[in-house]
Image (cartoon, helix red, strand yellow):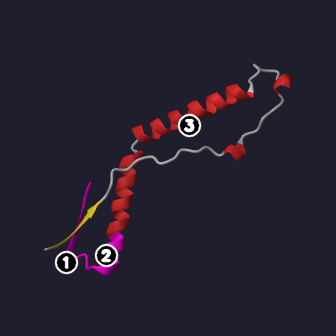
Amino acid sequence: GKKITVALPQAEVLDCVPDYDSFQVYHESESVFQQFTLDDTNEAVSSLVDQAEADAIANGLLERARENAETLLTAFFAQAYDPEEYTVTFTE
């Protein structure tokens, strides 16, 4: 009946950064489609980043992050403490 208790903080998104190196800017004046300015593009990227973060959270990103942390920590403790003897529990 030995017990290891681990206090884990609540999962949170620390940063959400798109890959700006993948963006390509074409000549705005030569577009055969609707012309977009660089300001339009920046505004759209900002909106998409916010929406991507909200979608990830809604689809369980934070819950899976916590599950992953618990799995990794349980395996870590199993290297030093016999899992047959010790129970690992997690609190917030």
Please name which of the two marks, 2 or 3, marks the residue nearer to the observer.
Answer: 3
The residues bearing labels 3 and 1 have C-alpha atoms spaced at a distance of: 46 Å
Which amino acid lies under the numbered mark 2 shown in the image of this protein?
Answer: Ala
Residue at the farthest right position:
30
- Dot 2 crowding, Cα within 10 Å, few <14, some 14–19, many 20+: some
Residue 58 or 18: which is nearer the viewer? Answer: 18
Give coordinates of residue 90: x percent, y percent.
Answer: 25, 60
Element type at mark 1: loop
**Residue topped by disc 2:** 78
Give coordinates of residue 18: x percent, y percent.
Answer: 61, 43
**Residue topped by disc 1:** 85
Q: Is residue 54 left or right of residue 31?
A: left
**Residue topped by disc 3:** 49
Give coordinates of residue 76: x percent, y percent.
Answer: 36, 72
- Residue 85 is one of the magenta-drawn residues: yes
- Dot 3 crowding, Cα within 10 Å, few <14, some 14–19, many 20+: some
In the displayed structure, 57 sits above or below 72; it is above
